[in-house]
Image (tube, rainbow, N blue to C red):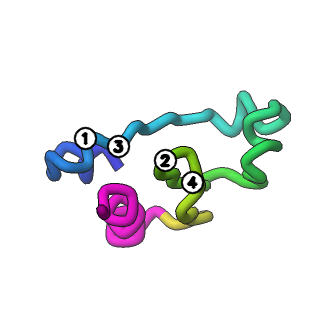
Amino acid sequence: MSALIDGNEAYKAVTVMRVDWDLYREDQITKDLGVRRRSTLVMFKDGAEIDRVIAQTDSSVIQELFEKAIAG
């Protein structure tokens, strides 16, 4: 994900919050977001979830999420 952000200036406007699953899997944030496993990426826009990917690490899949986040 860092390479995608570094490679596209528009993606730098997206705030990324990383939560370590091993440390926080029982915490409220993972429960509130319905995150049930590692490698879950949830994308928000204007405070609302717009999409998520689970167990996908392919950069093209993640890039699609960033594109949704920066779309007007």
Tag 3: residue type? Val
Location of mark 2 (residue)? 46
Q: Is residue 23 left or right of residue 18?
A: right
Nearer to us of marks 4 and 2 is: 2
- Near mark 3 (Cα within 10 A), the count class, few <14, some 14-19 or many ≥20, is some
Kind of element beneath mark 4: strand
- Near mark 2 (Cα within 10 A), the count class, few <14, some 14-19 or many ≥20, is few
Location of mark 1 (residue)? 12
Q: Are marks 3 and 2 in contact (CB under 8 Å)?
A: no
Q: Residue at x 82, y 43 (%)?
A: 31
Tag 2: residue type? Asp
Q: Are marks 2 and 1 in contact (CB under 8 Å)?
A: no
Residue 38 at x, y = what percent? Answer: 66, 51
In three-dimensional space, the C-alpha distance between marks 4 and 3, rounded to whole angstroms, equals 12 Å
Q: Residue at x 38, y 65 (%)?
A: 68
Residue 22 at x, y = what percent? Answer: 71, 35
Question: Residue 68 versus residue 3: which sits nearer the camera?
Answer: 68
Q: Residue at x 55, y 45 (%)?
A: 47
Q: Earlier in the sequence, mark 2 or mark 1?
A: 1
Q: Quick one: quadrant of the C terminus?
A: bottom left
Can you tell which mark lies on residue 71? Answer: none
Q: Are marks 1 and 3 in contact (CB under 8 Å)?
A: yes
In three-dimensional space, the C-alpha distance between marks 1 and 4, rounded to whole angstroms, equals 16 Å
Can you tell which mark lies on residue 42? Answer: 4
60 part of magenta stretch: yes
Q: Which residues are magenta?
A: 57-72
Q: Is residue 55 left or right of residue 23?
A: left
Q: Earlier in the sequence, mark 4 or mark 3?
A: 3
Tag 1: residue type? Lys
In three-dimensional space, the C-alpha distance between marks 2 and 1, rounded to whole angstroms, equals 16 Å
Can you tell which mark lies on residue 14? Answer: 3
